Amino acid sequence: MSREKTDRKREQEWQRTVALYRISDELTGRQKVSGVAAGTGVCLAISFIFYHSVIPGVILSPLFLWQYLKRKKKRCYEKRLRVLREEFRELAGVMASFLLAGYSIENAMESARNQMAEQGKKGDLERILSCMIREIRMGENAENVWLHFSAEAPLDEIRDFGQIFSLSRRSGVSLAEVLRKVADQLTQKLQTEIQIETQIAGKRMEQKVMNLMPAAILVYICLTSAEMMEVMYTTGLGKLVMTVCLAVYAGAFWLSEKMLESISR
């Protein structure tokens, strides 16, 4: 029984340790509040534009907010991964410099963490480095710590480095040289991603303009020729037509998002 309790305790400790290395894809409280406020505003604006009433928007706001926050959550997570990749590239280069200067891997990690904190980079990687250093101080070796991190890392580069780190320690390969190569490879990859992002930036702007155009044209017509559009807002048939138009509008928006995602992959 005592052995089962010991195993259970170890499993709980392992789960707590692993949780420290995970990159959460959840929105922060502030992001949720801003997302709900922005999403509600967009939903009510669309409702007023297409029906001259906010009642449909109030009724459909839960569904709209669910999709809006889901999209915001995805965008924020992708941004966190981009920042993590960039910070890991810098970390690899900084640690390589410290190792070449004669630092041990443990001291190189702590010095790199301190440098990140001084530069104000208190993001996911700085938090994870602090957890890794804490584990090392508690008696865990650096190899296992990096394996713990790489096992939960959302980026292939970090997962691969965890395995490379373990192999290099066993085979006696220069870790500084490994880190420098990792930094160079990440630099090339980031430069390629920047070039791709620059190329599709124009397409992204075109998408935003095209998505706004139907609503903008409808607002313009309502402001300049209100009597011509009155039938669309006061009769049952007109409201049905506007509902169909809104459905087509939403479908076109969704299609443009999917097309842009396929281009950026």
Image: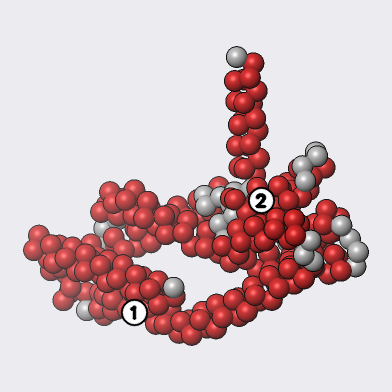
The quadrant where residue 224 appears: bottom left
Q: Residue at x 91, y 64 (%)?
A: 102
- In the image, 207 versus 55, the foreground residue is 207
Amino acid at the residue labelled 1? Met
- In the image, 221 versus 17, the foreground residue is 17
Question: Could you tell me how many numbered marks the image carries?
Answer: 2
Cα–Cα span, label 2 and label 1: 47 Å
Residue underneath mark 2: 147
The quadrant where residue 172 appears: bottom right
Q: Secondary structure at mark 1?
A: helix
Q: Is residue 12 left or right of residue 39?
A: right
Q: Residue at x 51, y 81 (%)?
A: 196
Q: Residue at x 60, y 31 (%)?
A: 11
The quadrant where residue 17 appears: top right
Q: Is residue 146 left or right of residue 30?
A: right
Outermost residue to the right: 102
Q: Secondary structure at mark 2?
A: helix
Q: Residue at x 82, y 42 (%)?
A: 137
Whole-percent x, y for residue 190 in the image: 60, 76
| Label 2 neighbour load within 10 Å: few <14, some 14-19, many 20+ | many
Residue underneath mark 1: 210
Quadrant location, the C terminus = bottom left
